[in-house]
Amino acid sequence: MSVPPRLSHVIPVTSLTEPLPIDTLFDPARPLEVEIGCGKGRFLTARAAQNPDVQYLGIERMLSRVTRLDKKATRLKLDNLRILRLEAFYTFYYLLPAHRIRTVYVFFPDPWPKRHHHNRRLFSPLFIDALWTRLEIGGTVQIATDHLDYFSTIRARLTADSRFCEISAMERAPHEQTEFEYIFRNQGLPIGQCAFQSLPAPERPLPPLTIPPEMEPNEKNP
Ligand SMILES: C[S@@+](CC[C@H](N)C(=O)[O-])C[C@H]1O[C@@H](n2cnc3c(N)ncnc32)[C@H](O)[C@@H]1O
């Protein structure tokens, strides 16, 4: 029986509280790698084309970038790449299964440079808990950013966490650099990059999230 062509690489999300049916979306026998904030997918599509036996999930919240990536994945016939249009922290916290992801890539995460916006940065203590919980034991997280202050914060937090140990960061050939990396490297801007491997540690259930009062729906913020 022939399999009909997939119309979209975007995973439909039907529930924001139930974990994704990961084993129906991805072959459990093949590795799964995730890029957070994958943008238009320059890195993700290059890797998926080079490594057909590896499965890739891109998480990106901006619709226009998701649409561009979806079209590119279709054009390149990448059947090992799927996309989630969702907030990455929430996705890691609730939707992904425990200890399933071999590698997480976070390249040029939004730096939120103003101090009073630092609480919007991805690498919060709660995200690091969720990251460890979703990575395979021995899995890795690869990080790069041009924002050197944010880079120091991320590296310090992961270094201080006994569930991770630092390893050598990957190098990316020019054709697999992300859109931002390609631009910044051509401008000669300094880029911080590091990588960490997850280590065995006692399991701690992720506590339910509480919504801060200012985020609660109200008349001004329905
Ligand atoms: C600065 S851009 C970098 C894009 C790409 N990684 C690159 O290096 O070219 C950050 C990207 O991450 C996405 N993003 C930021 N925070 C996110 C989040 N919490 N969940 C999902 N996507 C996010 C943004 O929409 C944007 O596409």
Image (cartoon, rainbow, N blue to C red):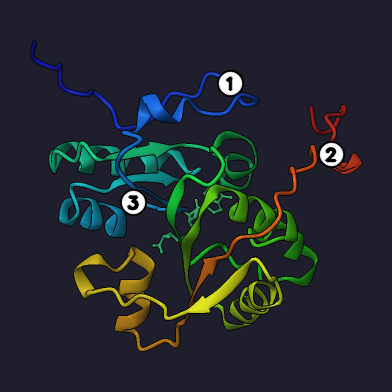
User: What residue is shown with label 2?
Assistant: 210
Check disc 3 and give the amino acid type: Lys
The x, y position of residue 80, in whole percent, is 24, 40
- Label 3, ligand 1: CB separation under 8 Å: yes
Establish if 35 lies above or below 192. above
Which badge, 1 or 2, is on the more N-terminal residue? 1
- From mark 2 to mark 3, how far is it between C-alphas? 32 Å
User: What residue is shown with label 1?
Assistant: 15
Whether residue 32 can be seen here: yes
165 on left or right of 7: right
Which badge, 3 or 1, is on the more N-terminal residue? 1
- From mark 3 to mark 1, how far is it between C-alphas? 25 Å
Helix, strand, or loop for circle 2? loop
- From mark 1 to mark 2, how far is it between C-alphas? 18 Å
Mark 1 in CB contact with mark 2 (< 8 angstroms): no
Residue drawn at point x = 44 percent, y = 38 percent: 63
Helix, strand, or loop for circle 3? loop
Q: Nearer the viewer, residue 121 or 154?
A: 154
Quadrant in the picture for the N terminus:
top left
Decide: few, some or many residues near mark 2? Use Cα within 10 Å; few <14, some 14-19, many ≥20. Answer: few
